[in-house]
Image (cartoon, rainbow, N blue to C red):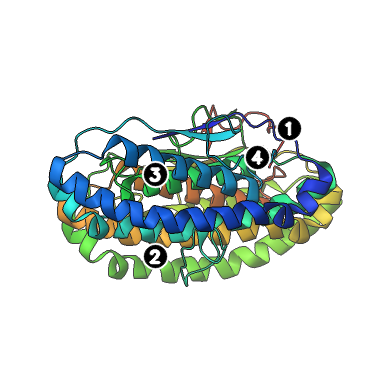
Amino acid sequence: MRLTVSDDLRRGHGSVLFRFWFALPFLLWLSLWAVAALFVVIVNWFATLIQGSSPASLHGFLARFVRYSVHVHAYVFLGAEPLPRFDGKPGYPIDVEIDPPVAQNRWTVGFRIVLAVPVLILLGAFFSNSGGYGYYNEGGVGLVFVAAFLGWFVGVIRGRMPRGLRDLVAYGLSYAAQGSAYMLLLTDRYPSSDPLTAIGPLPVREDPVVLETGDDLVRNRLTVFFRLLLAIPHLVWLALWGIVALFAAIGNWFATLFTGTSPEGLHRFLARFIRYSIHVYAFLYLVGNPFPGFTGAEGSYPVEVRIAERLPQNRWTVGFRIVLAVPALLIAGAYGTLLALLALLGWFASLFTGRMPLGLRNAGALGLRYHAQAYAYLYLVTGVYPYSGPARFSDAGAAPAPAPA
């Protein structure tokens, strides 16, 4: 199962404004199709369990259902612009390619609904409270819903969907499509949460705040089991440091507002605080393995934040920084839910295998990178707005990318 993206980011002002109403017929048809798919997948389960592969006719019906579901949700969540077709045929700007049926392991087929539980949990981080794929998670609002909510305002005003928000929607749809294909027995390949491979070619950016992962995925089972207890001293120290950082950020706001540049001492102090917070949360959420130091020294942890030297900032954006940062903080909160669920699943995986799955580690790194960029923006360490979607990065410290999202 592969998700392809050919959307050009352009949106019609009116189609965005009335998107929900335009989508109603497609959502109704999807609901009716889902009822039929439920009965088909039960038959498909017995057939696949007996003969070891999904019958071609059932596979084709369910593959078309998954494709149509992706098209509809891509339209609803502003991942694409044109109205979808009702037949689920390929050709939509956000589409899925699904291979023909192949042999599957009967044991994994027999216990598929149990094996899919982690997938359902993680889908809650993308779609909870969104009315999308129907997954609910009490931890907060899903990433895809937040991206669509913010993209709606931008689309109505500018007639475009920001690349970062669009790719964030596509990332969630990619995982949902993989999860649906796995649960409907279209494939026995377990869904991957890796954002670096979810949606095809990613933009290469040069941002002043970049997260690098030199972690080898090996996890010590003993420290994994007691990870929360081991992190308590760091969480206490981080809270105390955060109080000082808050006053430093206030002072930095006044200084940057008057001079147009963050004072070097405050810049270094706040950069070190952000770096230390990422070290702590990387350890807590199993994105990194070793016990971090207490100073936030650069280069001291395998999950590292590189922050560029201070640059002049626009005084208007400085003056209204706390207001401008609200959308970024909403996305950061949704990423926090994802990080918590990744840590829960990674805890079990690391405890049993001694390794953190690559997809979970990379998804966690994406969440931590966004947190670092969001709080660097809020604390005026940088004037570049955080980039919300998956991306690849060149050298940190280069000139800021001109089109943040």
Question: Are the residues flagged by discs 4 and 1 in contact, CB closer than 8 Å?
Answer: no
Give the amino acid type for the residue marked by disc 2 in the picture. His
Q: Give the quarter of the image for residue 111.
A: bottom left
As measured in the structure, the alpha-carbon distance from the residue carrying label 3 to the one carrying label 4 is 22 Å
Q: Badge 2, how many Cα within 10 Å: few under 14, some, many 20+?
A: many
State the image coordinates of residue 184 (x, y, percent, origin top left). Answer: 33, 49
Question: Quick check: 282 left or right of 305?
Answer: left
Q: Earlier in the sequence, mark 2 or mark 1?
A: 2
Circle 3 or circle 4, nearest the eye: 3
* Vertical placement of residue 258 versus 337, above or below: above
| Residue 235 in which image quadrant | bottom left
- 82 relative to 393 in the view: left or right: right
Q: Which residue is mark 4?
A: 80
Nearer the camera: disc 3 or disc 2: 3
Residue 276 position, x and y percent, is: 47, 54
Picture layout, residue 217 above or below residue 253: above
Question: Any mark on residue 402, and which?
Answer: 1
Residue 277 vertical placement versus 393 (above, below): below
